[in-house]
Image (cartoon, rainbow, N blue to C red):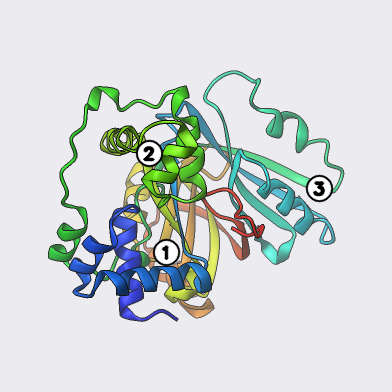
């Protein structure tokens, strides 16, 4: 488990993935060296990683939530194969290890970039069931973090982390093809130094800093964290597939986005039109959440719970060790 300083550091990085050690130290009332030392320890021992990601809508990308059922002896290999692809994220093994849930990114229109959905997956012999759900609207997730990561710093501390001036031209905040090398480097490590980003892009460090500020200020990119939820006290995870009366879908989705037990809530296509990712302390806590919090929303007509056994890939590309 993590101590209060670790949790404060994680909260600060969720607020601003590129916040300097000095700013974080000022917020936490510790030295810059202490913050740097804690960050390195969390990276090495807890798998903490900051990743910079494009906002899908701004990048012209569509998101699909894919459910696959495979034979028990092939599911793990299939999950790892999906995780190695550049167009997937959040690859999870669920339901006893025979179900795979993954987010697949495609072009927003056309079929040329849909090879995974249209060709690669259907011809895989070990798959016994497949469904693809188009993500229509995200109520919680992406730039909006799970509350389990953001319940440490008070308002003053948050201001210390986030309040720093940016000299930006908002009109230049749209993503362009020239940003591809920058995005690739940030996807591997969102805290890559300006010097290393300059080397990766062929730009000057000043140009990199200005471009980062423009993209962040416009919302074209955001920074997310990868760290085991179990270290933050969430030992039980589940994907919740819900069927909600259409007239109440937006109201229910908005309500669920405020539940501290949930890290992701989105409206989708399909027979189940709302999906959520639950993070609870233990099975008893999940049961209490399902039978009390969710049960209090009568517009949810049906619920399927798929326990998550392992996250094979999180938001960013696999790291050199082959793990998310």
The answer to whether 85 is drawn above or below residue 111 in the figure is: below
Q: Position of residue 312 (x, y in %)?
A: 64, 58
Tell which circle, 3 or 1, labels the residue nearer the N-terminal end: 3
Helix, strand or loop at label 3? It is strand
Q: CA distance from mark 3 to mark 1?
A: 32 Å
Tell whether label 2 touches label 1 (CB within 8 Å): no
Q: Nearer the viewer, residue 47 or 153?
A: 47
Label 1: which residue?
Answer: 295
Residue 44 seen anywhere in this rendered image of the structure: yes
Q: CA distance from mark 3 to mark 2?
A: 37 Å
Whether residue 314 sits left or right of residue 41 in the image: it is right
Helix, strand or loop at label 2? It is strand
Label 3: which residue?
Answer: 128
Quarter of the image with the C terminus in it? bottom right
The furthest residue to the top: 110
Identify the residue at horizontal 35%, vertical 68% (top origin). 36
Q: CA distance from mark 1 to mark 2?
A: 36 Å
Asked which quadrant contains residue 148, the reply is bottom left
3 vs 1, front mark: 3
The furthest residue to the left: 156
Identify the residue at horizontal 62%, vertical 57% (top origin). 92
Asked which quadrant contains residue 132, the reply is top right
The answer to whether 271 is drawn above or below residue 281 in the figure is: above
Q: Position of residue 44 (x, y in %)?
A: 52, 70
Tell which circle, 3 or 2, labels the residue nearer the N-terminal end: 3
């Amino acid at each position: 488990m993590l101590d209060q300083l670790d949790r404060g550091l994680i909260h600060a990085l969720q607020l601003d993935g590129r916040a300097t050690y000095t700013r974080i130290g000022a917020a936490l009332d510790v030295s810059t060296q202490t913050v740097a030392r804690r960050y390195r320890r969390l990276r090495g021992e807890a798998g903490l990683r900051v990743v910079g990601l494009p906002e899908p809508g701004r990048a012209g990308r569509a998101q699909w939530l894919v459910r696959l059922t495979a034979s028990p002896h092939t599911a793990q290999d299939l999950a790892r194969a999906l995780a190695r692809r550049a167009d997937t994220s959040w690859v999870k093994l669920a339901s006893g290890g025979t179900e795979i849930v993954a987010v697949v990114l495609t072009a927003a229109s056309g079929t040329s970039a849909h090879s995974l959905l249209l060709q690669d997956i259907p011809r895989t012999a070990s798959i016994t069931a497949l469904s693809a759900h188009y993500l229509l609207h995200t109520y919680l997730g992406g730039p909006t973090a799970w509350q389990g990561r953001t319940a440490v710093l008070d308002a003053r501390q948050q201001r210390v982390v986030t309040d720093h001036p940016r000299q930006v031209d908002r009109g230049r905040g749209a993503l362009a093809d020239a940003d591809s090398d920058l995005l690739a480097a940030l996807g591997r490590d969102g805290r890559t130094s300006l010097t290393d980003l300059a080397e990766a892009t062929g730009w000057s460090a000043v140009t990199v800093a200005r471009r980062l500020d423009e993209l962040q200020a416009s919302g074209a990119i955001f920074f997310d964290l990868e760290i085991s939820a179990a270290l933050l006290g969430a030992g039980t995870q589940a994907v919740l597939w819900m069927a909600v009366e259409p007239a109440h879908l937006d109201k229910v989705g908005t309500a669920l986005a405020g539940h501290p037990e949930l890290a992701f809530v989105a409206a989708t296509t399909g027979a189940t039109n709302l999906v959520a990712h639950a993070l609870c302390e233990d099975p008893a806590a999940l049961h209490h959440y399902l039978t009390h919090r969710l049960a209090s929303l009568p517009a949810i007509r049906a619920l399927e719970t798929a326990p998550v056994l392992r996250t094979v890939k999180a938001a960013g590309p696999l790291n050199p060790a082959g793990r998310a």
